Image (spheres, helix red, strand yellow):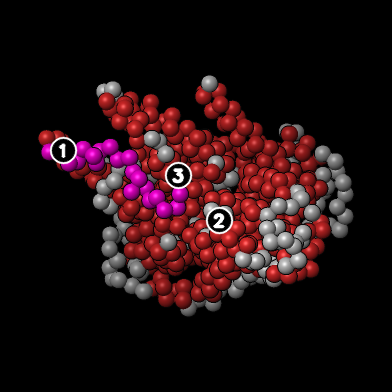
Amino acid sequence: MADVIEVGAARGDAPPPAAGPGRRNAPVRRAGRATPYLFLAPYLLLFGVFGLLPIVLGLWLSVHQWDFQLPNRPFVGLDNYAELFSSDSAIYGDWWQSVRATAIFTVLSVPLLVVVPLGLALLLNHSFPGRTFFRAVYFAPYVLGVAVIGLLWRFLLDANLGLVNRLAGMVGLPSDTPWVTSTPWAWISLVGVTVWWTSGFNAVIYLAGLQDVPAELYEAAKVDGANAWDRFRNVTLPGLRPVLLFIITTTVLASANVFGQSFLITQGAPGTKTRTVVWFIVEEGLRDNDAGRAAAMSIVFALMLAVVSIANFRLFRYRED
Amino acid sequence: MTTSTPTTRGPAPAVTDASAPTRAPGLALRRTALYATLVALALVFLMPLVWMLITSLKTYAGAQQIPPTWLPDPLSGYGYEQILNNTANPVLRWFLNSMVAATLHALLVLVTASMAAYALARLRFRGRKVLFALVVGTLFIPPTSLIVPNFLIVDSLGWLDTLTVVIVPGTASAFGVFFLRQFFLSLPRELEEAATLDGASQWQIFWKVVLPLSKPALATLAVLSFLTNWNDFLWPIYVLFSPETLTLPPGLGLLQGSYVTDYPVIMAGAVLASVPVLILFVLAQRHIIQGVSRSGLKG
């Protein structure tokens, strides 16, 4: 590994002019011994420095008191971890508050992000004029970054000047809902915006999955007199199982890593109730200068996500049996 | 896999019925209901974006009216003037920075990922399986959990507050390598074998045979990498500080901080950040959507 990286470093990022070493060998296996490593070198250099090193460094940081301001970074064993679980530590309350916020957001958003896109995909899964157009329209919000959609929805959800309350007023609903400043409205806003923003993404994945459900099965079900609901339950859903597992797993991870929406739209409000784990970790590590503690939180958080992902897989396995 | 567009392959049981004249009235009704639903949903998805554009063309006072007015009256360039002649918030500079960063990032991903993916797909070498497992393994680590260590790494490289910091580190992502490897594996080997018999080196095969055959996959990866980089928010807000080095996403955050409820200005900034990616989406829609759907099927 280290050798490969050094090769990459010595040669720089330029593509290897690899014509040379191959010439000597027999025609069929003309790759020189170094050739594969030369192809890999530029990527491995980057992967080593920004992909693997941070993992090792993260583990190392998590067992040290690592303050940017202080010259000494003493080894503290598992203290950084212990703090997260002992209710008398300074960080305990804020940390679990952020875990709670993240859990609430994930539990509320995942079901909608699994079901709404499936509905969109089923709607688009016929050939009709304009199909590509509508698919593009539903996908469009996703190509915008969280900064744009955050600013946009902060405005749309503004209690006085926003379009949402205006429209609510027009249909006879209260027109002064504090969408971004108090719960439960703040949660509804964060979840709603995320559904609007990313549904098109999951819908496109579902659509690709629907293509793989054999058309003959639908025909057979029709011949047997199955109605639309039966066909959905007995043909579509089982055919979509692998795609569903993929969507649920990736959506849980994406939702658990939520940051920009709460940073920009609710700005953590009310108080720090909607401040998420990722936000808290980065804030702790980079603003409050405690990289060791932040690293410990990152690792605990990654483990939590791993447990949830494994639970997902298991659940699906069992249901298959 | 790449050529079959959903429409040509679509199962579409409803459409086979469309020619059956006896059921025409019921079908017309269903068609109408389908389009009504599609249009209603399209409004939900597009309205916010239209509102962003409308607001960016209002005056400050126009955007402060309660209840809000539907159309800008008077139509005004106020928001755009504010962001174009603004030294504290140099939005055009951010735009340029974003353009340079996203373009260079996409190029760097293409070069490094295609070379690595070729080695992993086609060349035999010691440690190939271990290496591939290692690269794929990192796909399961949430990138957000590596931000703090990565911050220390770019700090010690002296990259903080330079454009390099938003161009280079993201290229370590395993996605491009994984994506291109799958594509290379799907290519027929005959052409490469023929080239080998003609005495081509691995480098020549890669450059003259494999890459030209992979244009659709390369385009998809380039567009996705550009989009990801253009939209990245969490990393740049912590590693870029000076107004003149910011990219658009952290810049927009700054703009929101300085203009608070001066919505025409904030929306003008948001429009400026949206236009390039929306244009890219219209032009490269097929690539983006295929890239996304293929990434799903792999899982």
Residue at which label 3 appears:
A205
CA gap between label 1 and label 2 equals: 47 Å
Percent coordinates x, y for residue A64 in the rendering: 83, 47
Task: Give the image quarter of residue A310.
Answer: top right
- Residue A19 colored magenta? no
Tell me the residue that label 1 is attached to.
Answer: B20
**Marks 1 and 3, how far apart in space?**
32 Å
Q: Position of A54 compared to A203: left or right?
A: right
Discs 1 and 3 carry the same chain letter? no
Name the foreground residue: B151 vs B21. Answer: B21
Q: Is mark 1 on a helix, strand or loop?
A: loop
Residue type (three-letter) at the residue carrying disc 3: Ile
- Marks 2 and 1: in contact by CB < 8 Å? no
Q: Give the range drawn in magenta.
A: B1-21
Residue for badge 2: B190
**Image mark for residue B211:** none
From this viewpoint, is residue A284 visible?
no
